[in-house]
Structure formats: C-alpha cells, structure tokens
Image (cartoon, rainbow, N blue to C red):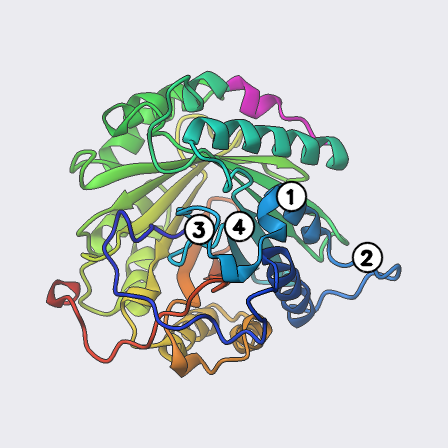
Amino acid sequence: MALSKSRHPYAAFGAPPPSGAGPRTTLGEHLSGQVRRLCEAAGFPAPADGSGPPLLDLLDLLGPAAVRPLGAGPPSPSFVCDDHSPAELSLAFGPGTRTAVRLLVEPGCTAGTLEENGRTGRRAFGELAARRGFSTEPLRRVEDLFFPPLMRGSFALWCAMEQRQEPAASVGVKVYVDPQAHGRERSAEVAEEALARFGFGRAWPALRAHATPRGPDRDEILFFALDLGDWHTPRVKVYVAHHDATAAQAEDMARLLPGQAAERAGEFTRAVGGAAVRFARRPLVTCLAFTERDTSGPSGCTVHVPVRDHVPDDAAARDRATAALRCLGLDAGAVDRALTAMTPRHPSHGVGLITYVSLVQSSWQPPRVNVYFSPEAYAVRPPRTADPDPRGVR
C-alpha cells in the first residue's frame, strides 16, 4: 500500500537486498520463500500434502513477472512498494484470534499501459475466482467506473488474499481499484457512485465531511476495495490519503464510529508516527469500511501510519509496531519473527521493510493491528542518519 517514489519524492535506495538470493532468483521464488517463512513464523501448520500455503495461489496472478529474474529489475514502476516490487505482505492481529497472513499483488504489472494492466488484472482475477469458487459480480457491477476506455490514475487493479487459521485454512480475497481512473478531479464522483451501487449512498455526505474536508489535493481519495469470497462480514472500503496531515485527520475519521474510537485513533497515530508528527513526506492513510450492518454510515475505520518515514531504521519501526501490539495485549513477539522470515539482514541495516502499522476499529469487533512489509525484492533503503525533511516533525 505504498505511495510510489514518482508521486512522493523519496531518498535514493541503496544496494540490492541481502536476501541470499542471486540476480537469477526470480520474483516468484523470492516471494514464495517469504510467504512460506512468514506463514511458518505466524504459526500456520505445514500442509500435510506439502503443497504450501494457499497464499501461493496468488503468485500465479503475476504471470510473466513471476519468472522474471530479480537482476532484471522491477517489471514496471509499480505503485505497490517503494522499490516497485509488485507485491506486499502483511500480518493481521486481533484479540482472541490467531495471526492472519496476507499477500497483495498487482497482476498486470508487466503491462505497458493502464488499460492493458486492467484487462490483465481482471482476467487473472477471474481465473482465481474460478479456482476458488467465488463470484466476481461485485467487481463487474462497477467495471464502467474503474476501467474506462482511457484510464488515468496510478494503478488499475490489485488483488489480495488473507489466510486465516480460524476457521481452519479459510481464505478471503480482496480487490482494489482506483477512484482516479477518470482523473483525480472526478474521484469523489466515482467513489460516491460506487458506494451507491452497493447500497451505501446515504453514507456519502458523512464520508465527504469527515474524510475530504480539505479538498482533493490534500485529502485524496486513493482506493476503492471489495471483500470477495470467504468473509463473515464482507466490506466495501474507501481509502483516503491525507497529505500534510496530523493525527487530527485520523481522529476526525474515527468520530464516525461510536465510543472512544477517535481518541484511540489519535493516540495510536502519535505513538507510531511520533508525538508531534506532521505527515509531510508521505500521507497518512485512512479507510472507512461499509457493511450491511449499517447502510447509512461506516461500520469500521482504519488508520494506516507510514512508520518508515518517521524512524531511522527498521529496528525502531519494529519497536513501535511491537509497542502498538503490546498496548492491545496482542502477540508482540510476532514482529521479530516476521522480520526474520522476511530477510536475513539486521533491522538496523535498512529502513522500509516495515512500511505501515495500522489500527483497525469497527462497530462489532475489538481493535486490531496490522503490520505491513515490503518484499524488498529490488532494493533496500539505507538507514536514515538525519531527518532529510524538517517538515516531518514540528
């Protein structure tokens, strides 16, 4: 869920990742190893037939990119990660549940145009749906909104899969599309119409007031997402990037939920991003989730804090993620295990392996925490020795 260097200027990357893989190692091999090790670190039992985690099915969606050697560089300037890796991994933690593992990929990352990217992505997504036995009707319902003949925006389609241990080996699928497909100036119009098609038209005024009060240049509608497949409570989600924001934007969004959601979101944002931080280099991202539980307002609100911009290295990012987990009584040791699974390098030798730490709040579940990881398939950003942008803290 990164915002790419092309859109948000970023310090130069350093050497290729010390992953133990040579330049002939393919992207698919690199990601497959990380998925297997991350699932093992999260406590998933190895399949009896030796087939590997179900998440590996998602790597088939990468098509030619999966067999591309890492030494050839990224297949495209992907919007998914800072080094243009067309994939992202994450862990989801919740009280009373075992850790879930997620993988997100950009199926059309080898395409030369957004239009081709969208066609490739939809075709690959359809093949996954056929294998997994879920319907793509929700995506077809809004295809005209997100896949116009001439596409604009930053990406076409991403697909994610969540593998859970409870119930046993259940898998949920998500699809992400770009509300800016007709241009940023029409993103609000597209998001409003998409919500209406899923029965959430009455929720739009509150979303607009709390999520985008500063206009599209500062409060940018970023993603529209759908839960498909095996979900207890499927969601329709709208993501907003808050440029040059503070924790106040997270609090404003969370006020749409009852209770202490706003206070909790503000405290979390300050703890992970820094007590007095202003998100000037990379935006704070929030997400409102809508379900059939309430068609007039959100059932959930998530704040995604770009921790990598506010720490000197991944050791510090690990400490902040671990503290966030510990505050909610969650498995704080899981982050260390995940770092070992992702890379052999020491956390202090780079920054950006841990990309976001997120607080998920909803009207029907206790707060949860997600931690996101870059595959670092193509580069490792060196540790930050000084704040290169004094606007980052005030």
As drawn, the label of residue 365 is 4
Q: Position of residue 368 (x, y in %)?
A: 49, 58
Q: Earlier in the sequence, mark 2 or mark 1?
A: 2
Residue 139 within the segment the image draws in magenta: yes
- Foreground tag (4 vs 1): 1
Q: Which residues are magenta?
A: 134-141
Residue type, label 3: Gln
Which residue is pictured at 33% across the width and 49% down the height? 285
Q: Which residue is the site of mark 3? A: 361
- Foreground tag (3 vs 1): 1
Which residue is pictured at 49% across the width and 50% down the height? 86
Query: Label 4 to label 3, Cα distance in Å?
Result: 7 Å
Q: Position of residue 225 (x, y in %)?
A: 48, 35
* Quarter of the C terminus within the rendering: bottom left
Which residue is pictured at 43% across the width and 49% down the height? 80
As drawn, the label of residue 51 is 2
Q: Earlier in the sequence, mark 3 or mark 1?
A: 1
